[in-house]
Image (tube, grey):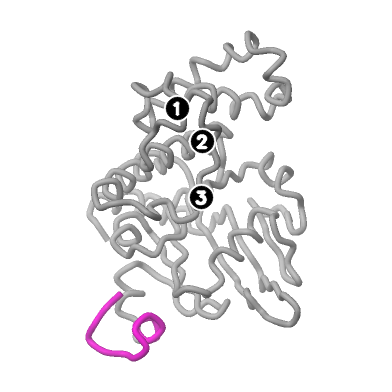
Amino acid sequence: MPTEASPKASGSAGRAASALLETRDLTKEFRGFRAVSDVSLRVVEGTVHALVGPNGAGKTTLFNLLTGFLTPTSGEVLLAGRDVTGMQPEQIAHLGIARSFQITSLFDQMSVVDHVELALASPTGLGYRFWRSSSAMKQFRPRAMELLDEVGLTDRSGAAAGSLAYGQKRALELALALALDPKLLLLDEPTAGMGLEDVDRTIALVKKVAAGRTVVFVDHNMHVVGSLADTVTVLQSGQVLAEGTYEEVRNDDKVITAYLGQAGDQHV
């Protein structure tokens, strides 16, 4: 783990008993196929937790179960000790979970700042009437600009979202998630499709926004995982294969076998 992550990791150790998110024997079947099987996950408040695994390991299905986009066949999802199993996505979002998706979905002609204002307005109900009350939306402008500054998009606030570079679109998507002021931030492949420069920029951005927050993310890039994660859970065939620090899991023979087909001296 990088040295800069250690203060946060040590700070969270004192409240190791405080789990913001838990799953208990979480299972999802699709016509007899178990995409997620008896997964018990524990995400400690104030930490960054990575979910990794080979393609088809069940990572996206697990994300969908955590956010209510799928209903589990059995098992429980707990947020701060509250059972949220089977709740609708909007209900879970109101309880403090925000998710960014692997594929961005933005309005190309709408400005960057208007996107964030709309996200800020959505919990108030105003967002659903934004085309009839554009002047009322301006009350959200100061906070919108703060969020754009947080993700490094202040200078593009007036630009159309469609004009942004790919990495900037992902940064905007992150600002939209942060607009919900989430207790828990879920990031689905935050560096997918990025070049090396954008990957490093996104790592720095996630480190910045993770301060004082709990983050769970999926990523195939082990450089990203090693740079960000306090805890890594490795999934294979829908089950938890291993869990620990990045160094612990990358040296686990079971993990090496899952990624490479056989144990050996190579590491993930």
Task: Look at mark 3 in the image and give the residue it sits on.
Answer: 103
216 relative position to 68: left or right: left
Which mark is first along the chain, 1 or 2?
1
Residue at 34% over, 91% down:
262
Q: Tell me where residue 217 appears, x and y as whole percent.
A: 47, 56
220 relative position to 121: left or right: left
Q: In which quarter of the view is residue 192 placed?
A: bottom left
Q: Nearer the viewer, residue 172 or 230?
A: 172
Q: Are marks 2 and 1 in contact (CB under 8 Å)?
A: yes
Closer to us: mark 3 or mark 2? 3
Q: Amino acid at mark 2?
A: Leu
Instruction: Classify mark 1: helix, strand or loop.
Output: helix
Q: Tell me where residue 166 appears, x and y as whole percent.
A: 38, 42
Q: Tell me where residue 104 appears, x and y as whole percent.
A: 51, 44
Which mark is first along the chain, 3 or 1?
3
Residue at 33% over, 67% down:
246
Say if 91 sits above or below 254 in the image: above
Residue at 68% over, 19% down:
130
Q: Quadrant of the C terminus?
A: bottom left
| Residue 255 magenta | yes
Q: Which residues are magenta?
A: 254-268
Mark 3–mark 2 distance (CA, rounded to whole Å):
17 Å
